[in-house]
Amino acid sequence: MPLEIVKSFSLFFVLLNPFLMSIYLLDIIRKSSVAVFARTLTLASIISSFVFIFFAWIGEAFFTDVLQVRFASFLIFGGIIFLIIGVRYALLGGKAIEQLRGPAKNIAGSVSVPFMIGPGTVSASIITGKRLSLSHSFFVIALSLFCVVISVVILKMIHDYIHMKNEPVVERYIDITGRVSSLIIGTIAVEMILKGVDVWLNLQ
């Protein structure tokens, strides 16, 4: 059980990726105080946690019984979307963030969807629900989101300090992190597609 908890936590943390999230939220980081930013991120994580717990609890039944589609279809389509995002990051770096998200009218909601709540994290929720009991799934989800929020708030504080000293360093970090993260995103996307194909073949 401890190993499954560690594996599930690692999966969530990698998918949520606080370093990439700090780039995604860069406009909010620049305009908000630490206190306001922390409250916004906390609210977004609470919204996301309810969604993740729901999918960890109900699992594939939501797709097969409610939507009446195969979970494999969700994995394959979600993987394709994730792959497109990864390619855009690789080509555009940090500039891809603003184009993908668009203007943030409801900040907490725009942070939750599509960045926290997406094909990868929904799939991770279902996988976690299969591996662990509901109580352990809740613990993993809560701990993952807590660690991500703390990490991004710390990155915001570092950004505020460095930005005043040397703005070009921040811009270089944004571009490099966006392009490096594309490798992780692309790899996860391909893995989702392959898992979807495996699930589909096993159902034949």
Image (cartoon, rainbow, N blue to C red):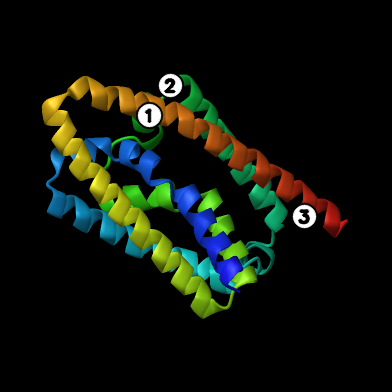
Q: Earlier in the sequence, mark 1 or mark 2?
A: 2
- Looking at the image, which residue is at 72% across and 49% down? 196
From the image, state whether disc 3 or disc 1 is nearer to you: 3
Q: Is residue 105 visible?
A: no
Amino acid type at mark 2: Leu
Amino acid type at mark 1: Gln
Task: Give the left or right position of residue 88, taking residue 131 as reference.
Answer: left
Give the spatial CA distance, label 1 vs label 2.
10 Å
Q: Earlier in the sequence, mark 3 or mark 2?
A: 2
Task: Give the left or right position of residue 154, taking residue 11 as reference.
Answer: left
Q: Which residue position holds label 2?
A: 92
Residue 141, percent across and down? 45, 65
Task: Kindly indicate whether the residue at mark 2 contacts the one at mark 1 (C-beta within 8 angstroms).
Answer: yes
**Label 3 neighbour load within 10 Å: few <14, some 14-19, many 20+:** some
In depth, the one of 135 and 203 nearer the eye is 135
Amino acid type at mark 3: Val
The mark found on residue 99 in the picture is: 1
Give the spatial CA distance, label 3 vs label 2.
33 Å
In depth, the one of 83 and 61 nearer the eye is 83
Give the spatial CA distance, label 3 vs label 1.
33 Å
- Looking at the image, which residue is at 31% across and 51% down? 151
Task: Kindly indicate whether the residue at mark 1 contacts the one at mark 3 (C-beta within 8 angstroms).
Answer: no
- Numbered disc 3: secondary structure: helix
Q: Which residue position holds label 3?
A: 199
Up the image or down, 89 lies above or below 33; here it is: above
From the image, state whether disc 1 or disc 2 is nearer to you: 2
Query: Quadrant location of residue 93?
Result: top left
Quarter that holds the N terminus: bottom right
